[in-house]
Image: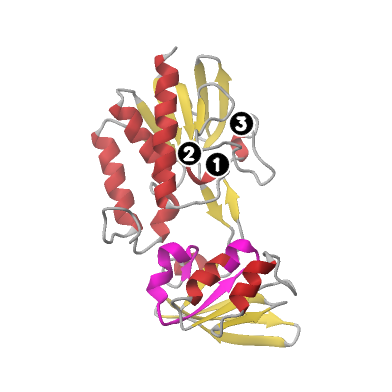
Amino acid sequence: MYDVIVVGGGPAGMTAALYALRAGKTVLVVEKNGFGGQITYSPKVENFPGTMQMSGNEFADKFLEQILAQGADVELEEVTAIEDGGDTKIVRTSEGTEYQCRAVVIAAGVKHRMLGLPGENELVGNGISFCAVCDGDFYKGQDVCVAGGGNSALQEALLLADICKSVTMIQDLDYFTGEKKLQYALFARDNVQRVTGARITELLQENGELTGVVVETGDGTKRIQCQGLFVAIGLIPENKAFENMVRLNEYGYIDSGEDCTTGRKGVYCAGDCRAKSVRQLTTAVADGAVAALAACRYIDSM
């Protein structure tokens, strides 16, 4: 029996574990893939307070080392269900394992919707990025493309247009779905081009680095040279396994505010899997601290 089980080993989950451990609780972190989450896709992180520069993998490795030194148990398994047994919560995994605890922090994160093209996974961090705030500076003065046409894609492109030589928007529909105000602001830029009704069919690369994309339009195919491709076609929250335990909004995110509560006693959430407007490393670790302290208060009141 653990005091707290944290589902997810990204920055939010590991912060939750750290705070619970330092409050004297026993903690298990269950992660299905690899510790660090989405931040491990960033070759350089330069926007984390107090750190000039680090790689996402370096951050994840040091964080994992830190929670292990504090006494955390960790398991690489996929959580398939959480059951509420009142004062005891039961966490089940795809391995058939059953763990029991007094409180759960769901920090399952999100996954980026991918284009589904050959070589895409290998180019993540080597030309393919998902966050202009995180990685935009690496493409300063270079040519980049942005895949997508919603608000997120337009906002990414606005940030990139300030620092990149050119930004080409590639949208598979014949129109952009983002707010008109954002469209006006973006397409007023001289260094921004748009290609609509276009589908990216191939990623061009040389020596493991992205060099361009091939797009298919109604007029045929064309090659667009670029050093960076920012994919902004949506996020998929990893909350399917918890839909019977916590409230999800229409987009599949846990319906929770800044207090990280879920409406179910003893179950909390943290990080990108909850409904929020800003998803950054700093907001993830903030959630982790809030959720862990709430869980500790709950346990202490039992």
Residue drawn at (30%, 49%) of the image: 61
Three-letter code for the amino acid on which mark 2 is drawn: Ala
Residue drawn at (61%, 28%) of the image: 245
Q: Residues within 10 Å of mark 3 (few under 14, many from 20)?
A: many
Query: Marks 1 and 3, how far apart in space?
Result: 11 Å
Nearer to me, 262 or 257: 257
- Is residue 119 among the parts visible in the rendering? no
Three-letter code for the amino acid on which mark 3 is drawn: Val
Q: Residues within 10 Å of mark 1 (few under 14, many from 20)?
A: many
Q: How is the image coloured?
A: secondary structure
Q: Quadrant of residue 21?
A: top left
Query: Marks 3 and 2, how far apart in space?
Result: 13 Å
Nearer to me, 58 or 144: 144
Q: Quadrant of residue 142?
A: bottom left
Task: Determine if the magenta segment contains residue 97.
Answer: no
- Contact between labelled residues 2 and 1, with CB atoms less than 8 Å apart: yes
Residue carrying label 1: 274
Q: Indicate which disc, 1 or 3, sits on the residue closer to the N terminus.
A: 3
- Contact between labelled residues 3 and 1, with CB atoms less than 8 Å apart: no
Q: Is residue 244 above or below residue 147?
A: above
Query: What secondary structure is marked by label 1?
Result: loop
Query: What secondary structure is marked by label 3?
Result: loop
Residue carrying label 2: 270
Query: Marks 1 and 2, how far apart in space?
Result: 6 Å
Residue carrying label 3: 246
Quadrant in the picture for the C terminus? top left
Q: Is residue 86 above or below residue 82?
A: above
Q: Give the residues in magenta.
A: 128-154
